[in-house]
Every structure is written in C-alpha cells, then in structure tokens.
Amino acid sequence: MTEKTWMIYGANGYTGVLVCEEAVRRGHKPVLAGRSADKIVPLAERLGLSYVVVNLQDEENLAKIVVGFDLVFHAAGPFIYTSAPMVRACIKGGTNYVDITGEVTVLEHTLSYDQQAQERGIALMSGVGFGIVPTDCMANYVAARVPDPTQLELAVATTGSPSAGTMKTILEQSPSGTLVRRNGQLVRHPTGTGGRRIRFVDREHTVLPMSWGDLATAYRSTGIPNITTYMAFPERFLPLMRWVGPLSQSLLAVRPARRLMQKCVEKAVHGPDEHMRQTARSYVWARAANEKGNEAQAWLDTSEGYHFTAIAGVHCVERIFEERPQGALTPALAFGADLVLQIPGTKRYDRLNDS
C-alpha cells in the first residue's frame, strides 16, 4: 500500500480533515491539496504530510499535478462545481478518482464516463462515504433477493448533525426540488409531500421523499426502474415542509440568495463534535419488490455519518489499490453488497424482532 501515491483534494474541509486523520491512522501518507496554502499548510504540518496548492479552475496545471498520482480522493464540495474538472483531469492522467458526494447530478455525471474509465484502466467512483455506501449496499442486497424487481425504496435516519459543507450542498440542490425515479427517468416529486412512517432499527420514524444519491447509483447498480429515497424528519416538521419546501426552492433559485445563505452557514454551522461522531448512530431501511408482489426488506445500523465516511472512504481507496476495478462504478458494484459490513460498528438485519 505504501507504494501507491494518492492525493486528498479539499483536505482542509470538515470531512477532508477526518479522511486525512483516518488515512494517517491506517499508515497512509497521502499528499494534501487545496486551493489555499493558508488552510492546507497547517494541516500538513500537523499530520507530517506533504502538500500541494492547486486551483480547480486552472485545469492545465491540475492535469499536470494529477498525472503524478495513482488516485485522487476528492473531498471539496459542493461537488456540482468541483467534481467535473477533477474527473476530467483524472481521465486525462490515467488516475483513479473517488469522491464523497451524494448529489444526484454529480453521480450521474461520474457514471457517464464508464467507457473512458475502462479505456484508461482506472476506476471512477463517486460516493465512497455515508452518502452512498450504506444505501448502495442495501439496495443491492434486497434487489438480489427478489426476482425481477421493479420497485426500490430506501430510507435514511440519522441522529447526528450536518457540517457546513453538507448544508451548502443542500442549498445548491434546493432549486432542483425533490426527485424520484419512475420508469427509469428522473422526475420531480412535489416537495414536502409523500410522508409516511417507517420502522428502523432504533424505532419508527416519519420520512419524506428526498433526492438521495441512490436515484443515480442504485439505478446503475440494480437496474430497478422505480426508486424512491426518503429521509427521516421530526413529524412536527411535516406540515411546515409542505409550504416551506416549495418557498425555499423558489427563493434559493436566485443565486445571490444561495450565496448569502451559504455565508451564513459558514459562520454558524460547524458539524458534529468528536463526542457526537463517536456516539451517534445512523440507520437505513431498504425494500425491493416486483410486479408479482414478492418483496424483500432489510435494515442497517451503523455509525455516525461523518465518522462512517472517513473510514469507508479510506477503505475504498485501499480496495481500489488491491483489486484494481475499472470503469465508472458505484461502491457496491465494485466491491459487493457486503462492503458496508466491513465498516466497524455496522450490523445488517433481515428482520426486526418486533417488526
């Protein structure tokens, strides 16, 4: 593993720092990268790592830098703005690429480069963190237990809090509204509607349809044409969501309004602290069904999302170096539905005792 060289771009961000620390803990020495020396240098000095300063907008210089690495771990969001130039540089340089996005459009974009990735003999894998790994694995697990599945439902409930980067990404996605997949196509779903109750490992939660990344990845990895993804919300928020959702969608369609909100987020949101990362839990429910009424359900209990992302992200890097998958892949396509079980503190259930 020490013979492989890799770079973490966006290393100074909230999640980037966690990935860097996990990499060092596991004996890696990645090169840290970002656009600001003032932010990258102190982190590199603290961890005893090398660094490079590069701006994504300088694609010519970016390509020259990327070609010297076996893999780039891209941790700089919102990925809708940052992923494409790095993907292009990695394809040009024959460099493996991973990121931690959960953005549907970004995942679709990465997956569209499958042929180019295979021709270059590299892996392009978006979503190696909590945003995709647990749900992609669960989607593939239940899909394999139903003959010719045509419907897939995935729901996520977390007890942690978001980082500033996650909140900024949510703000960027808001104008697109809520998406679902129907008959293989991404279509809009009325924001704030479709609430229901779902039993998770810990308890029953109220969920709403949300644009989770599996609308892209689970479709690619399972081929199921009808997919709905849900996120748990406090039940008292549901009446509010029916009118706040569409209102914020319209407001945030104005770019200056999004920029203002993002500046507020940068000042007010800091992400979960160490105690929260070590103690909070995350839950996933998955259900696949076919036209004959056959179905399979499964439940997942795992660690707090950012803690999970750091471990899963470095684990996927190691697997890429060891197994050398090629093409534009989802995590479960590359490493199987049991990938998620290799992350410490994760348990999967085929049934619940009180379900």
Image (tube, rainbow, N blue to C red):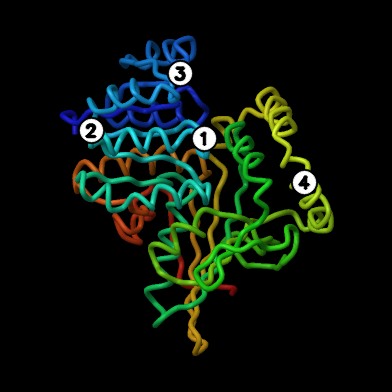
Mark 4 residue type: Ser
Which label is found at residue 152? Answer: none
Name the foreground residue: 330 vs 23.
330
Number of marks present in the image shown: 4
Residue at which label 1 appears: 81
Which label is found at residue 70? Answer: 2
Q: CA distance from mark 2 to mark 1?
A: 23 Å
Residue at which label 4 appears: 250
Q: CA distance from mark 3 to mark 1?
A: 14 Å
Within 10 Å of disc 3 (Cα), the crowding (few <14, some 14-19, many 20+) is: some
Residue 257 sits in which quadrant? Answer: top right
Sequence-first tag of 3 and 1? 3
Within 10 Å of disc 4 (Cα), the crowding (few <14, some 14-19, many 20+) is: some
> With respect to residue 264, does 210 lie above or below?
below
Residue at which label 3 appears: 35
Sequence-first tag of 4 and 2? 2
Within 10 Å of disc 1 (Cα), the crowding (few <14, some 14-19, many 20+) is: few
Name which residue lies at 32% across and 14% down. Answer: 48
